[in-house]
Image: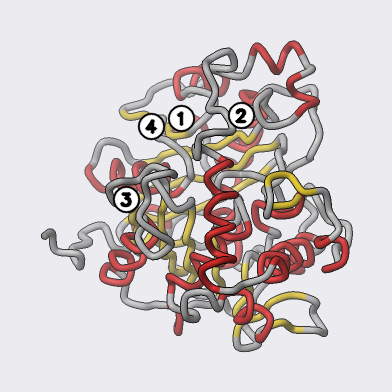
């Protein structure tokens, strides 16, 4: 067994800027490359750097070599294209900086309405071309892969804990109420519990509002050493600890149960590597690609017992603010999360955390925010965690 407390990178690498194009739930006339380039340029400029200062590049889509050409970055000493969600990219880039492979990394992510996740994109010939693997064999309804798996595990959650759809619904309502304060969010119209319960069912028991919103848009981040970050234009945000967790088996149809998946690995390890936990955080970001994922993160993190996530959120509902405030102060996904800002594969969660700790979150700002906890990804092969501190 490895030493879970070992964390030689703690507070040694910083995020010194985060930028976004904003997100829309419709097909735009832009490519993923142009969206990523715009966010990247804005992030570089935000911390007072130029393209000549960037010697590392790490992102999802487009490929690193394509974005390097688009931005005209003259010289890289390291690049990478890890798998989503974006904690993976932050952790990988931070490790590269810490190891000396590069000094300053542009991390990017372009969310894109693809032919596999929206009907309008499937009808668009350019988006069909831009969707890798579109013609590959897809899992049928008899499998548990991908979104089908979350519908199955949502049913298991309701059965095992005697929960109701209202427990899922309060996650969606909190996201929409927070998104109303976020000019970058795709979905900002008010949402009521009646709206949620009467929404079109997609894969029972998951309805339209239980699933993240496919969007066009991009986020970007600048990472460098903590020492260098303190000399740049914005307050640095230190990467305190990062974890990517998996158990075996990790397939949707083979996972042993709701309490035996990658989330538990993330929580155990992230707690061991961090100097603080939920009692000391100022803002919390549970991943909400599907509403039951958020409830499981809340429960696994220790905010409440298994099966009590919906009740916990209800107990901490601030009627005046129209959203969840844990103990009257800790905001939960204040940007609107994947359910309402858009399906950013956690780049939005990380960007909002950075802005909160830099004091740049505008109307959403948590007073004197110093510590953030991000629990990203799902149950199976993509559970991830990140703790950040103001530097």
**Residue 79: quarter of image:** top left
Residue 37, labelled with which disc? 2
Q: CA distance from mark 2 to mark 1?
A: 15 Å
Q: Earlier in the sequence, mark 3 or mark 4?
A: 4
Q: Earlier in the sequence, mark 4 or mark 2?
A: 2
Q: Front-most of 24 and 258?
A: 258
Residue located 34% across and 51% down the image: 244
Judge depth for marks 1 and 3 and give the one in front.
3
**Residue 217 vertical placement versus 131 (above, below):** below
Q: Position of residue 358 (x, y in %)?
A: 57, 65
Residue indicated by mark 1: 52
Residue 235 visible from this viewpoint: yes
Q: CA distance from mark 4 to mark 2?
A: 16 Å
**Residue 24 vertical placement versus 175 (above, below):** above
Judge depth for marks 4 and 2 and give the one in front.
2
Which type of secondary structure does the marked residue at label 3 adopt?
loop
Residue located 61% across and 31% down the image: 36
Q: Quadrant of the C terminus?
A: bottom left
Judge depth for marks 2 and 3 and give the one in front.
3
Which type of secondary structure does the marked residue at label 4 adopt?
loop
Query: Tag 2: Cα neighbours inside 10 Å, few (<14), some, or many (≥20)?
Result: many
Q: Front-most of 27 and 146?
A: 146
Q: Position of residue 68 (x, y in %)?
A: 49, 22
- Left or right, residue 263 beside residue 167: left
Residue 55, labelled with which disc? 4
Q: CA distance from mark 1 to mark 4?
A: 8 Å
Q: Earlier in the sequence, mark 1 or mark 3?
A: 1
Judge depth for marks 2 and 1 and give the one in front.
2
Residue 246, labelled with which disc? 3
Q: Position of residue 128 (x, y in %)?
A: 68, 15
Q: CA distance from mark 2 to mark 3?
A: 32 Å
């Amino acid at each position: 067994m490895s030493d879970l407390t070992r964390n030689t990178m703690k507070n040694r690498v910083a995020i010194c800027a985060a930028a976004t194009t904003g997100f829309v739930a419709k097909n735009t006339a832009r490519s993923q490359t142009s969206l990523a380039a715009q966010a990247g340029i804005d992030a570089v400029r935000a911390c007072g750097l130029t393209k000549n200062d960037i010697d590392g590049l790490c992102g999802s889509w487009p490929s690193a070599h394509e974005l390097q050409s688009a931005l005209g970055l003259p010289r890289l000493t390291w690049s990478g294209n890890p798998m989503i969600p974006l904690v993976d990219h932050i952790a990988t880039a931070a490790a590269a900086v810490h190891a000396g492979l590069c000094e300053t990394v542009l991390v990017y992510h372009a969310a894109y309405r693809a032919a596999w996740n929206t009907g309008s994109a499937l009808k668009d010939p350019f988006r069909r071309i831009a969707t890798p693997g579109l013609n590959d064999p897809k899992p049928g309804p008899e499998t548990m892969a991908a979104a089908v798996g979350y519908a199955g595990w949502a049913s298991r959650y309701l059965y095992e804990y005697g929960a109701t759809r209202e427990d899922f619904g309060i996650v969606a309502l909190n996201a929409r109420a927070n998104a109303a304060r976020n000019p970058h969010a795709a979905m900002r119209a008010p949402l009521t519990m009646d709206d949620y319960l009467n929404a079109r069912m997609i894969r029972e028991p998951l309805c339209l509002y239980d699933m993240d919103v496919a969007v066009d848009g991009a986020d970007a981040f600048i990472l460098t050493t903590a020492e260098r970050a303190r000399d740049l234009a914005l307050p640095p945000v230190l990467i305190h600890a990062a974890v990517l967790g998996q158990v075996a088996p990790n397939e949707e149809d083979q996972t042993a149960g709701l309490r035996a998946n990658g989330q538990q690995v993330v929580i155990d390890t992230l707690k061991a590597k961090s100097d603080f936990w939920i009692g000391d955080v100022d803002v919390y970001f549970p991943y909400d690609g599907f509403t039951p994922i958020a409830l499981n993160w809340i429960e696994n993190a220790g905010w409440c017992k298994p099966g009590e996530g919906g009740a916990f959120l209800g107990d901490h509902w601030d009627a005046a603010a129209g959203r969840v405030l844990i103990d009257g102060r800790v905001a939960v996904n204040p940007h609107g999360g994947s359910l309402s800002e858009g399906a950013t594969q956690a780049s939005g969660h990380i960007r909002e955390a950075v802005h909160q700790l830099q004091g740049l979150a505008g109307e959403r700002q948590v007073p004197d925010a110093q510590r953030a906890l991000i629990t990203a990804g799902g149950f199976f092969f993509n559970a991830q965690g990140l703790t950040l501190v103001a530097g």
